[in-house]
Amino acid sequence: MNEILEQALLYDFYGELLTAHQKNIYEQFVLEDLSLSEIAEDAGISRQGVHDLIKRCNKTLEGYESKLHLVERFLSIKEKVHRMNTLLEEKEKISTEELIREIKGISSEILEEL
Amino acid sequence: MNEILEQALLYDFYGELLTAHQKNIYEQFVLEDLSLSEIAEDAGISRQGVHDLIKRCNKTLEGYESKLHLVERFLSIKEKVHRMNTLLEEKEKISTEELIREIKGISSEILEEL
């Protein structure tokens, strides 16, 4: 996964645990794709200050994930539901019986993770 | 949902954010179902101390959920997968076409939440 996507995902899960100031700066960088200089000018802090804050936020968010693994759990479920969807989209490729058996198998796998 | 089940669920999601001491006491109460007096004796603290610690842990865990809503997100997905499973278990009740349409609908609903 590319870094920005990973940061956005971590932010989606744990962002509410950052302070309002951190969220404001981090969103501009990760979600709105502004440059460090643009954010610095707008916030009235140095470019280095913005850089450090974002680095600290990354560390905080990664810390939560390394303890809770909730992004990992969600992504694993997502992958399985996508697999199910693909089977349903291409349902003419296999027999209906087989399709239903496959879907049942995947849905049991998901329930084990929930 | 009954209180102990809710506490166990919150602990499953956010427990790693408690301290080792808090986890130790909280697990004995919520997961091992020991009484306050038993825990107090074993830990060498007062019954009131155990009571306060558990109350504080509940508050901390509920605080995480009120910010992140991840238990809520998981439960909503779980309910949908169960719905899917029930349809598959009782597949003779509706036509195969209808079954596949229903399953597709639910799997899209789940993907929207992921």
Image (tube, coloured by chain):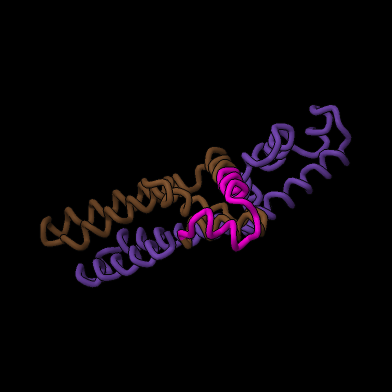
Chain colours: A brown, B purple
**Residue B77 location, quadrant:** bottom left
- Residue A78, how many percent across, how many down? 37, 53
**Residue at (78, 47) in percent of width and height:** B56
Of the pair A19 and A85, the residue shown nearer to us: A19
Which corner quadrant of the image does residue B97 belong to?
bottom left
Residue at x 64%, y 40% (from the top left corner): B31
Residues rendered magenta in the picture? A33-56
Examine the structure image and report whether residue A54 is included in the region drawn in magenta. yes
Q: Quadrant of the N terminus of chain B?
A: bottom right
In this image, B60 relative to A25: left or right?
right
**Could you say which is closer to the camera, residue B93 or residue B6?**
B6
Residue A81: % across, % down: 33, 55
Q: Toward which corner of the image does residue B89 lie, by quadrant?
A: bottom left
Q: Is residue A39 magenta?
A: yes
User: A6 and A80: which one is in front?
Assistant: A6
**Above or below A2: residue B40:** above
- Does residue A99 appear anywhere in the picture? yes
Is residue B74 something that shows in the picture? no
Magenta-colored segment: predominant secondary structure:
helix
- Image quarter where the C terminus of chain B lies is bottom left
